[in-house]
Amino acid sequence: MGKSSKDKRDAYYRLAKEQGWRARSAFKLLQLDEEFDLFTGVSRVVDLCAAPGSWSQVLSRVLIKHETFGRTAWQNQESLLRQQMLGVTGQRDSQVDAGAEMTSKTETPTIVAADRSKGDVKIVAIDLQPISPLPGIVTLRADITHPATVPLLLKALDPDYDAATASKSASNPVDLVLSDGAPDVTGLHDLDMYVQSQLLFAALNLALCVLKPGGKFVAKIFRGRNVDLLFAQLKLFFTRVVVAKPRSSRASSVEAFIVCLDFRPPAAFQASLERPLGVGDTAGLAPAKAAVDVDGLAAGSPIVSEVAEVVLEDLREARDSRSTPTTSRWIAPFVACGDLSAFDSDASYKLPDDYVSLDPIQPPTAPPYKRALEMRKAAGGAYGKTTV
């Protein structure tokens, strides 16, 4: 498949190269930000599974370079044009009013520039694959499922952090944790969904160690059976949980993004990758209790006293409440992100006759198929060396 055919099939693939993005997934984060305003009041961000770095590139251009995109850029442009038109009209009416207006205009950008030049923005990107450098981004090559990653992340967030004396929690927590990671799909949807859910749990466990109260967590999910149980588990830690489908995400794909807002962990909860969520009976929330066969103990048994009968009754009620589907399932609201007038990611668009296909902004640094390409090149091509 050539470049032109791929450009025709996917408009966002073409736009990513034209606008300087490393991957088309940058539009997914931009559309999520338009819907949920993810970047307002955010200065410390952790980007998990960041390679090739398109989401980190969005963070760099929005939080560090203060660029605007999408609806916000259009609104700012319209506002600037309106101010310029009013300025021209005021100049024709009165030179004094125009002078006062120009003075206010020159003072406002100065204040904004001083406010934006604080330099307190901190962005850390983590992935198993190497990531090409980005302005203002600290990159780590680490495994988000390994407990040793937490000290590395805390050291990157706070250079003064000492792993020997400090606890495994951030002294200066972050405002936003992103995860756009996905496993190598096999085509077996149930298996792919399970592996993706485990990857999401790994991202969540790491986010719980560094996220501050009121923070935000955004991660990729695969929709399917029993995904409502995953929503209910996330609802334990966040006040608002929403499933979002950006317009740049293909409708034929099962991927979506879980947007968790207002981080509120349970009381006395201690986050740790050494004892992550979903491992064991405690799930990190409460001490484990011994399993009791409450039906096997008769009320008239000699070992059962009046106090024990009350305890058994409580155990029966707790068991019955856990077995009720309505207590452990919760359906998260679904939101479609992106303007309806935008490109359809599943449609093919006709390119102009003079269109020139562009190369990707950042080719893969260490693709998983790199070894296969080297072996094919050594063999002399796709069909091996030819003999005469």
Image (tube, helix red, strand yellow):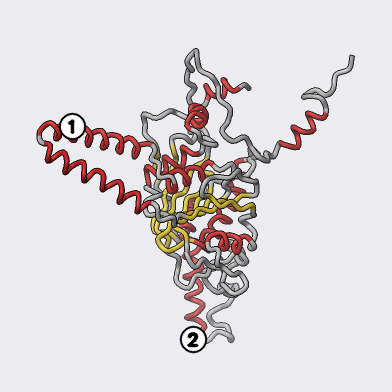
Q: Which residue is mark 1?
A: 88
Snapshot quadrant of residue 53: top right
Crowding at mark 1 (Cα within 10 Å: few <14, some 14-19, many 20+): few
Label 2, label 1: how many angstroms apart (C-alpha)? 88 Å
Q: Which of 74/294 is in front?
A: 74
Q: Is residue 136 above or below residue 208?
A: above
Q: Nearer the viewer, residue 235 or 300?
A: 235
Image location (x, y in percent) of residue 154: 56, 63
- Quadrant occupied by the N terminus: top right
Which residue sits at x=45%, y=63%?
A: 212
Residue at the right extreme, as displayed? 388
In the rendered view, tell whether residue 270 sits above or below residue 261: below
Comes first in the chain, label 2 or label 1: 1
Above or below, 269 against 143 in this view is below
Residue matched to label 2 = 306
Can the viewer see residue 359? yes
Q: Position of residue 80 (x, y in %)?
A: 27, 36
Identify the secondary structure beneath mark 2: helix
Q: Is residue 295 left or right of residue 129?
A: left
Say few, some or many: other residues with alpha carbon within 10 Å of mark 2 (under 14 / 14 to 19 / 20 or more). few
Q: Residue at x 49, y 28 (%)?
A: 18
Residue 359, image x, y percentages: 58, 27
Secondary structure under the numbered disc 1 in the rendered image:
helix
Kind of residue at badge 2 = Glu
The image quadrant where one finds the C terminus is top right
Left or right, residue 272 beside residue 333: right
**The disc labelled 1 sits on which kind of residue?**
Val
- Disc on res. 354: none
Percent across and percent down for residue 107 are 26, 48
Whether tag 2 and tag 1 are in contact, CB under 8 A, the answer is no
Q: Nearer the viewer, residue 132 or 217?
A: 132
